[in-house]
Image (tube, rainbow, N blue to C red):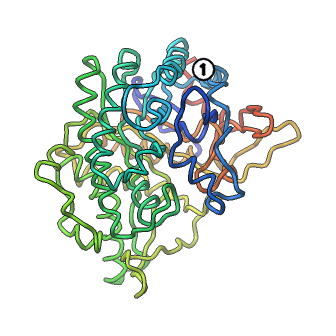
Amino acid sequence: MSETGLSAHAFGEDFLWGVATAAFQIEGAVGEDGRGRSIWDTFAHTPGRIAGGDTADVACDHYHRYAEDVRLMARLGVGAYRFSVSWPRIQADGRGAPDQRGLDFYRRLVDELLTYEITPCLTLYHWDLPQALEDAGGWLSRDTAERFADYAALVAGALGDRVPLWITLNEPFVVAAFGYALGFHAPGQALLGGSFPATHHQLLGHGLAVPALRAALPAGAQVGITHNLLPSWPATDSPDDVAAAKRLEDLQIHTYVGSVLRGRYPDRLADIFPGSDLSVIRDGDLDTIAAPLDFLGVNYYSPMVVKAAAPDNPIGFDFAALPGVPVTSFGWPVVPEAFTELLTSLQSWYGDVLPPIYITENGACYDDVPGPDGFVQDDDRIAYVSDHLDALARAIEAGVDVRGYFLWSLLDNFEWAEGYSKRFGLVRVDYETQARTPKASFEWYRARVSRR
């Protein structure tokens, strides 16, 4: 960990400091007030899919405890909160008139945030697709993109007067790769290269949603998208390993960033998605996907190290270890300089079209050990965040226009396929009692970002 913590001169007075969560991971109340079933409800209730057989039926009970959680944010002193709206709370089947009860919940949440002068940053889609839409084809279907734009307009019409920052999609790469290519996440399809329609239709949904949002939002509201972006490093300098790293870079960075910023997929798209139906790309789609953005959201956790694929691996690369560096409890290597590299590389690749950046997620998962009073002295998490903020400062000093940072996450929560076995929070949640206990990292972050 650095001696100085933040490189304070790199962050201006208007820099936005926040925390982030996602609806499915914290809300619970999955059967209340007309909420429909999502693909993650189905997936979590399918035996063998989630570690420990966990479900998010209760999660952090944020649906009932949101006011307590906002008070925690006020105590933390952050200026912004990134949260997501549960699509099936607004439209149980993903189409039709909105459920006023769902809209009212988010209105109450936003009003509570504004009471404490915390800026709401709203993500429309953080993975909880209505199951009814999945039954009709999910993101493999073009219709889902159109339904998403309708949903975006409904939420903007209800909350646009209160929310200044809007994110269409969170991590469409992970949705397509883990949900449709490999089957590790909901909806659990394993189509490998045939998953490209899920990529394209998510991006098309984003492109259709941007003008729908702008039509419903007041002037000055900002619209963006969040991508998870990981530097791809070859395991060795052999030509095959270098080619494997380039393949991953094209897949998870240039397919997603290049399409939304330049209206272009990588030239070798058919090679990146072998066996996929590229005819889903219709005339005009890429122009739609490249609707002008006010910002780009970047989620960063670690670099990825890859090597040439084994003969029986159709993906085109295999993952490799990065020796000699610490890892989180997920096994992700902790390499802060890779964060700087990613951001400066984005500037190099896309500088002529790159909008301002918000770091919409960054944080670390560790095996927290609470004391008798439930307090967690999470020095490893403090070190991770401190070093990554220094890395962010170096990118800003190098000329990258970064406007804000959202730490993942405010609360320990349901960590997707890992259930409750992994903890990212600044606040420990006892899942049996729902007691919230701020960790040492909470106080560390508060001391550095608090406006109070």
- Give the residue drawn at x 29%, y 21%: 217
**Residue 357 sits in which quadrant?**
top left
Where is residue 148? Give x, y as percent: 33, 38
Eyeballing the image, is 70 above or below 11? above
- Give the residue drawn at x 44%, y 32%: 91
Amino acid at circle 1? Ala
Q: Nearer the viewer, residue 361 or 451?
A: 361
Eyeballing the image, is 331 above or below 167? below
* Image quadrant occupied by the C terminus: top right
Pointer 1 local density, CA inside 10 Å: few below 14, some 14–19, many at least 20: many
Where is residue 11? Give x, y as percent: 42, 32
Where is residue 179? Give x, y as percent: 46, 58
- Give the residue drawn at x 46%, y 60%: 178
Q: Nearer the viewer, residue 451 or 177?
A: 177
Q: Residue at the top extreme?
A: 115
Give the tally of numbered discs.
Answer: 1
Q: Which residue is mark 1?
A: 74
Where is residue 34? Give x, y as percent: 54, 29
